[in-house]
Image (cartoon, rainbow, N blue to C red):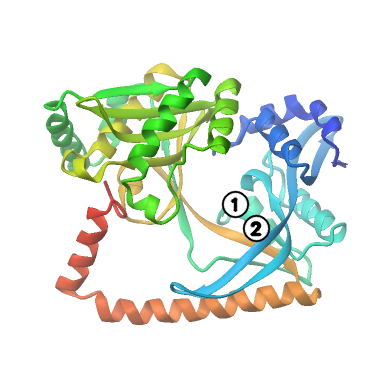
Amino acid sequence: MEIVSYSNCLELDSLANAWGRLSEKELIFIPSFSELRYRLGAGGSKFRILVASDNSQIVAIACFVYTTAIRSYGIAARKLFDLRTKEVSLFGSCVLGQPSENVIRKFFQLIIEGSDVDVIDVGHIFIDAPLYNAITSLPKGIIAWTERKKQIRWLIRLPGSFDEYAASLRATTRAAVASERRKLERESPSFHVMQRPEEVENFLRDAEKISRLSYQWKLGYGLYNDDNTRRRFARLAEDGTLRCYILYLHGQPCAFSWGELNHRKFVWDTTGYDPHCRKLSPGTALLMWMIRDLVENTNCEIFDFKWGSEEGYKSRFATLNFSCARMYVAQIYNPYSLLIITLDKILNSLKNLAEKLLFRIFARGAIKQRLRSAMRRYGIATY
């Protein structure tokens, strides 16, 4: 097994076919090679791409991007302090090609030994998968740890027809969706899919109107119709991976969603709806229409919700789920890295303790139900 390192954008074109071939094998969405090339070259990012070959055949690729990051530490809404760190992030949170744990460990050892970094941000990865097992069994002196809360990666394996998908849902979910659909259809809704460069401006204009009304906007997670977003969407549209959806009621934008479709996988990115239309369940209606469109009009096989909690709309509509965790790796012999590891573990322990105390106080009868109802009203737990 031979491992070769690439760190110059001029060298990358030779990897295009292998990137596409290995991405096809992944269960989750992987950005296209042109998107990888853009992200590495646009900001002059320092990177290392490690490529493992067997008999001149590329069998594994991992891309590590170097950044200077700010790690914020706080408890609840109270910010304590920030730390500037030299980090390496694993692009796509995966090692393409589904290599053995030994190959993955070798990749990470090469990055750790050959880089002046404080932390490697592996991203959200499947628990007990080869990548997880490899980084949790690195040699002594290298430690891997997770964020405080583990999450679930929710997916839909799309069948040959929308009716087959609907039949796979729980009976209560099917009945609720049918009832909500009939209620919405009385308002003569209009659904649109937008994917061409010339459609980007109209989509972002109307999507931002909706986003400003959603709870995500108040939390800083809305969809902005700014220059950077327009350029990004135009680039994805030219690459043929952009897919945007929007629902209109009485000529006014009511709900939107967008994502990327590549290698037969669609990854859902941002969504939002007008809370004034909440009783019509526009988010659910748009989601069902998106799934129907992907089944009937594309070659999509996997709908990737990304990660979420055990409750909420993702758990209602997904057909596959995998436990995942946000993973970090660092050397304990590096004093600054050890400081970061220690701070993370201490604050995570304090937050876990506080959460247990709050749960004991509030998770009782009527109070618990009122909290859940409040979350639903603002779209936090479900549509």
The reply, left or right, for residue 62 in relation to residue 250 is: right
Residue under label 1: 129
Q: Residues within 10 Å of mark 2 (few under 14, many from 20)?
A: some
**Circle number at residue 133:** 2
Q: Secondary structure at mark 2?
A: helix
Q: Position of residue 231 (x, y in %)?
A: 58, 31
The reply, left or right, for residue 19 in relation to residue 129 is: right
Q: Nearer the viewer, residue 342 or 2?
A: 342
| CA–CA distance in space, label 1 to label 2 | 6 Å
Q: Position of residue 160 (x, y in %)?
A: 38, 22
> Is there a contact, CB below 8 Å, between mark 1 and mark 2?
yes
Classify residue 227 by image quadrant.
top right
Q: Nearer the viewer, residue 262 or 51?
A: 262
Classify residue 238 by image quadrant.
top right
Q: Nearer the viewer, residue 131 or 250?
A: 250
Q: Secondary structure at mark 1?
A: loop
**Circle number at residue 328:** none
Q: Residue at x 39, y 38 (%)?
A: 208
On the question of residue 103 being in view, the answer is yes
* Above or below, 379 relative to 169: below
Amino acid on which disc 2 is placed: Asn
On the question of residue 300 being in view, the answer is no
Q: Nearer the viewer, residue 133 or 49?
A: 49
- Residue located farthest toward the front when viewing the structure as drawn: 227
The reply, left or right, for residue 61 in relation to residue 196 is: right
Q: How many marks?
A: 2
Amino acid on which disc 1 is placed: Ala
Q: Residue at x 34, y 22 (%)?
A: 192
Classify residue 163 by image quadrant.
top left
Q: Position of residue 239 (x, y in %)?
A: 60, 23
